[in-house]
Every structure is written in structure tokens, then in C-alpha cells.
Image (spheres, rainbow, N blue to C red):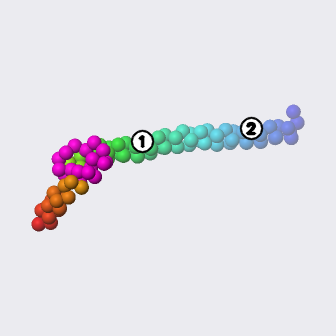
Amino acid sequence: MDDETKKLLADTYALNKDNNDMLKKLISFQKWNQIYKIVYWSIIILSAVGAFYFIKPMLGDIFSVYTGGASVSSFSDVTKTLDNNKNNVQDLLKSLNQ
């Protein structure tokens, strides 16, 4: 081989080595990015489920206060019970204001 071909071959080898290093870094970045996204969405979903788990008993207590202790089977039952017990709700609000 002549000197010019050797120089071109050495330059090509150096460029390929740099390219390979960049590709390895890119693949590593993509893997870590995917792991971070999984952790991010897991935290969001688990916090929403946890919040619902802790708020559900409080919502049950609120519905039982407004319905006079009756169980709630649907939204229409809640509105009917509230319409029937307007005086009870007003008495409850008056007692809370005192």
C-alpha cells in the first residue's frame, strides 16, 4: 500500500471509532431515558392510586353525612335523598356555624 492509502485508511478507522463511541453513548442514553420514563409514570400512577385509596373513606363519610347515613347506590339516589333531607342539611350547617 502506498502512503496516501494508509493515511486514508487510518483516518477512516479513527472516524469509525469515534462514530462507534457516539453510538454506544446514544444507546446508553436511550436505555436510561426509558428507565426514567417508566419510573416517572409509575410514580404518577401509584400516587393517584394511593390518593384514591386514602380519599375513598373520606368521600364515603361525606356521602353518609349528606344522605343521612343511607348507603349511596347511584347519583340519582344522592339527589333524591338530598331533596328529601333539605331541613336536615340546613340544621347540620347551622350547628356547624355555631
Residue 37 as seen in the image, left or right of residue 91: right
Q: Which disc number belongs to residue 13?
A: 2
Percent x, y of residue 8: 82, 40
Q: Residue at x 82, y 37 (%)?
A: 6
Which amino acid, by three-letter code, is at mark 2? Tyr
User: Please, is residue 70 above or below residue 92 in the view?
Assistant: above
Nearer-the-camera pick, 42 or 26 = 42
User: Please, is residue 98 above or below residue 43 in the view?
Assistant: below
Disc 2 packing (10 Å; few <14; some 14–19; many ≥20): few
Residue 28 as seen in the image, left or right of residue 72: right
Is residue 32 something that shows in the picture? Answer: no
Percent x, y of residue 65: 19, 52
Q: Residue at x 22, y 43 (%)?
A: 71
Disc 1 packing (10 Å; few <14; some 14–19; many ≥20): few
**Disc 1 designates what residue?**
42
Classify the position of the N terminus by image quarter: top right
Q: Which range of residues does the magenta coloring cover?
A: 65-82
Is residue 74 something that shows in the picture? Answer: yes
Residue at far top of view? 1
Residue 7 as seen in the image, left or right of residue 89: right
Q: Main secondary structure of the magenta part?
A: helix
Percent x, y of residue 80: 26, 51
- Spatial CA distance of label 2 from label 1 is 44 Å
Q: Quadrant of residue 24?
A: top right
* Mark 1 element type: helix
Percent x, y of residue 34: 52, 41
- Asked whether 79 falls inside the magenta stretch, the response is yes
Which amino acid, by three-letter code, is at mark 1? Ser
